[in-house]
Amino acid sequence: MPERDYAATVQAIRNVAAGGAAPTARLQRAMELIQARHPQYQWVGIYLLRGDMLELGPYVGAPTDHTRIPVGRGVCGTAVAERADQVIEDVLELDNYLACSSTVRSEIVVLIWEGDTILGQMDVDCDEVGAFGPVDEAFLTQVAAILAPLLKHA
Ligand code: SME
């Protein structure tokens, strides 16, 4: 996908984030925008970090059983434990994977920061192997920075 398409989505999310709706509604709208504009982003959601637990926030895609994930578990909990984004080429190669749906094959988790504090993360799944790479991480890092102030009120 051309980089300008990601740039256009970032601008659209800036507009949503600056809007007057409730913070949770703005986060939900941002998730919907990303999924609508980028077809490989099949499940797109936010987990909020509360203590040692990730709690599911606004998302688009199939409902998941993983509404609460302890730090250290799965791809999501590993990102927090290691304080590092995760780009998973093929989830079937992982031991430490929590399946949202049996059809998912690749995943990216990008942390949402305030200074050096982790507020939460963006999690994206795709049914194709290797759907995500450095361009996606850079895009989601920009999105995370825009959404970070809203997480504190979600
Ligand atoms: N796959 C994630 C769990 C979240 S669901 O995919 C939405 C993990 O392994 O932590």
Image (cartoon, rainbow, N blue to C red):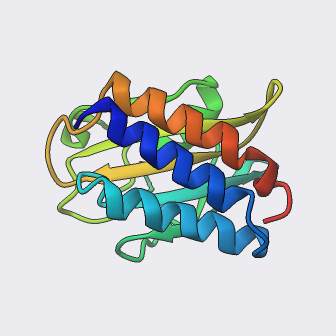
Quarter of the rendering containing residue 69: bottom right
Q: Position of residue 21 (x, y in %)?
A: 75, 75
Up/down of 150 relative to 111, above or below: below
Q: Relative to 30, is 6 above or below?
A: above
Residue closest to the eye, 75 or 36 = 36
Q: How many marks?
A: 0
Residue drawn at x 63%, y 35% is 80
Q: Is residue 126 visible?
A: yes
Find residue 4 and report its horizontal and vertical position in percent: 35, 34
Q: Residue at x 60, y 45 (%)?
A: 121
Q: Nearer the viewer, residue 24 or 86?
A: 24
Residue most extreme to the left = 128
Image point (81%, 48%), residue name: 149
Quadrant into which the N terminus falls: top left
- Side of 96 relative to 29 (left or right): left
148 in relation to 57, above or below:
above
Whole-percent x, y for residue 20 in the image: 79, 71
Q: Is residue 74 visible?
A: no
Q: Is 37 in front, or is 68?
A: 37
